Image: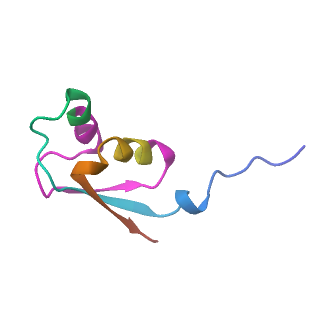
Amino acid sequence: MKAAKSGKTAAGRGELRVTLVRSLIGYPENQRLTARGLGLRKINSSVVRPNNPEIRGMIAKIIHVVKVEVISK
């Protein structure tokens, strides 16, 4: 049997700093809830999240209102 892959790819390393740079007023409720799910509440609030497909999918949904920086460990 082959050993299972660890799931660590180039996109899966490190962490992401996500900053809310635009207001969510006027955007659909699902986008507001996505920002809240990431932990973003106010403009210019930042959170550090792991770099994994789930978080990247959430960011992709609201990329027009956030700034993303990759933090290497």
Residues rendered magenta in the picture: 33-54
Quadrant assignment, res 18: bottom left
Q: Would you say 26 lies left or right of 38 here?
A: left
Picture layout, residue 62 above or below residue 9: above
Q: Is residue 21 magenta?
A: no
Q: Position of residue 41 (x, y in %)?
A: 14, 45
Quadrant assignment, res 17: bottom left
Which quarter of the rendering shows the N terminus?
top right
How many labels sit on residues? Answer: 0
Picture layout, residue 57 above or below residue 50: above
Residue shown at the point (54%, 57%) measured from the top left: 12
Residue shown at the point (53%, 62%) measured from the top left: 13
Q: Position of residue 44 (x, y in %)?
A: 13, 58
Nearer the observer, 52 or 25: 25
User: Which residue reaches farthest bottom?
Assistant: 73
Q: Is residue 36 magenta?
A: yes
User: Which residue reaches farthest top?
Assistant: 29
Q: Position of residue 31 (x, y in %)?
A: 25, 35
Residue shown at the point (62%, 56%) measured from the top left: 8
User: Which residue reaches farthest right?
Assistant: 1
Q: Would you say 69 lies left or right of 22 here?
A: right
Q: How is the image coloured?
A: rainbow
Q: Position of residue 57 (x, y in %)?
A: 43, 42
Residue shown at the point (76%, 46%) measured from the top left: 4
